[in-house]
Image (cartoon, grey):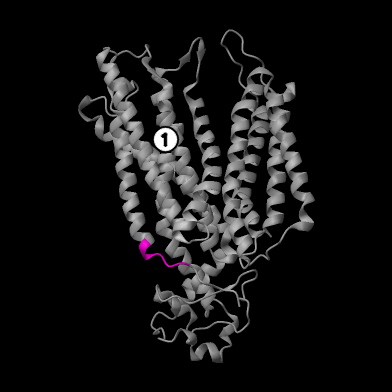
Amino acid sequence: MRGMRMLQRLSTIGQGMATLTISASVSALQPPSCTDSVCPKATTLEYAVFFLGLYLIALGTGGIKPCVSSFGADQFDDTNPRERKKKGSFFNWFYFSINVGALFSSSVIVWVQDNVGWGWGFAIPTIFMGLAIISFFSGTPLYRLQKPGGSPLTRLCQVIVASLRKLQKEVPQDSSMLYEVQDKRSVIQGSRKIEHTNDLNCLDKAAIITDDDIQDSGFSNPWKLCTVTQVEELKILVRMFPIWVSGIVFSAVYSQMSTMFVEQGMTMDTSIGSFEIPAASLSIFDVLSVMIWVPVYDRIIVPIACKYTGKEKGFTELQRMGIGLVISIISMTVAALVEIKRLDIVRTLDLVHDTVTPVPMTIFWQIPQYFLIGAAEVFFFIGQLEFFYDQSPDAMRSLCSALSLLTSSLGSYLSTLIITIVTSITTKGGKPGWIPDNLNEGHLDYYFWLLASLSFLNLLVYIACVRRYQYKKANCG
């Protein structure tokens, strides 16, 4: 069950944080202090304990992220209109709470690590993780627990194998001739039946009842005969795929916040009086943007949209994601315009080949692009999270949530690939290229325009896919 998996993963993260705390607090597990810029190498034991903590945290995080949002949404009854509406708000405030934690860790915890010590810097999150485990465990009697439905990958493979076995068979015109159990509930534990849809008919072959199935008692062998619900599970994933791909492009834009936005900011004036602002710290405006936009969306935009659209949530998940894609294009446009302004100052003051003097343009010019990225997050990422939960088969919600989160990592890889290709093409013939080490000699604005163009093309493809998308029809029996 998702609840048990969450508790296990929380415990794993707690063990990882405790290991890091020990690594940073016990002198025997720390390398000697640096002397005159010479730092002794850490021992194998010190490395082992440190990386053990990191890998435990990575393992626990990878396991809990797909489960926590699904488990939270499972607490709302889809058949109850009031609870169904509250579930939409749950995803908003769930994402809000994540950003509250990010704000705390990037400000208070960082300050503790720099001014008090790494031991306390790790100990404080460890204590909070312990409290989280206790809090989660204490609510066990109150939770609505969904029965595990078995391996979703096995069921998908069964549909493919069964349909290939009957490749030469004709799908009947009457869908009631396809195999489905007569019970109110599906044979898949914790899953409702899913109504038959008329697209992707080649997969329906897996549910064709043949004479061999009847003679060999094939009704009990899902590798030969699958239910309509099981076939529809695979159809749903196939329909979701183009929507999922659009999230990769969006995540590539989102990843600029920790890469090219920082590079751009490092060339600008980062001082306020005698205080220097780290360029990377401007990402706090993304967090603040999310914390502003979530309540604005949930309390203001949704009620207004409901009056005009007549929809329970104001917008469908796909419409909400589309708005996020539009805002992401605007954010790249703003970033490009800021870079054009920066390069204009560089050329006016003859700073093109100067790698030391900061451009006399305050880094706060970047705030709008960070703020827009935060707004795009609220629309796209939360909409995506809710879409993959609502549209996924009941017994595949954790898997589909994991797929939605996978777009973030693939987006980072896509961003790296784009940068590699751009650098390779624009540096031919000894040219500095768009993104040289000295950005004053390059054209980072062209790179932002490229991302804006790719995002626009992604939006067009997304709209085409959304127009053809067929929503899941669950049969509540």
Residue kind at label 1, given as amino acid type:
Gln
In this rendering, the count of numbered labels is 1
Q: Is residue 477 above or below residue 142?
A: below
Q: Nearer the viewer, residue 320 or 452?
A: 320
Q: Position of residue 39 (x, y in %)?
A: 59, 15
- Up the image or down, 65 lies above or below 183; here it is above
Q: Is residue 35 left or right of residue 238?
A: right
For the residue pair 395 and 294, the one nearer the viewer reads as 294
Quarter of the rendering occupied by the C terminus: bottom right
Relative to 388, does residue 336 appear above or below in the rendering? above
Residue 470 counted in the magenta span: yes
Look at the image and tell me in which quarter the N terminus lies: bottom right
Q: Which quarter of the figure has residue 14?
A: top right
Packing grade of label 1 (10 A; few <14, some 14-19, many >=20) is some
Residue 264 drawn at (x, y percent) = 38, 25
State left or right for residue 19 relative to residue 405.
right
Q: Residue at x 43, y 87 (%)?
A: 174
- Residue 320: give x, y in percent of width and height: 45, 52
Along the line of sight, which residue is nearer the eye, 142 or 302? 302
Is residue 29 in view from this perspective? no
Furthest residue in direction left, as rendered: 429
Give the SS element for disc 1.
Answer: helix
> What residue is disc 1 on?
256
Whether 194 is drawn above or below 140: the answer is below
Image quadrant assignment for residue 76 = bottom right
Give the magenta-colored segment's residue range. Answer: 467-471
Give the residue drawn at x 49%, y 73%: 231
Can residue 173 be seen by looking at this rendering?
yes
Rendered location of residue 11, percent (x, y): 72, 45
Q: Which secondary structure class fits the magenta region best?
A: loop
Q: Residue at x 38, y 19 (%)?
A: 267
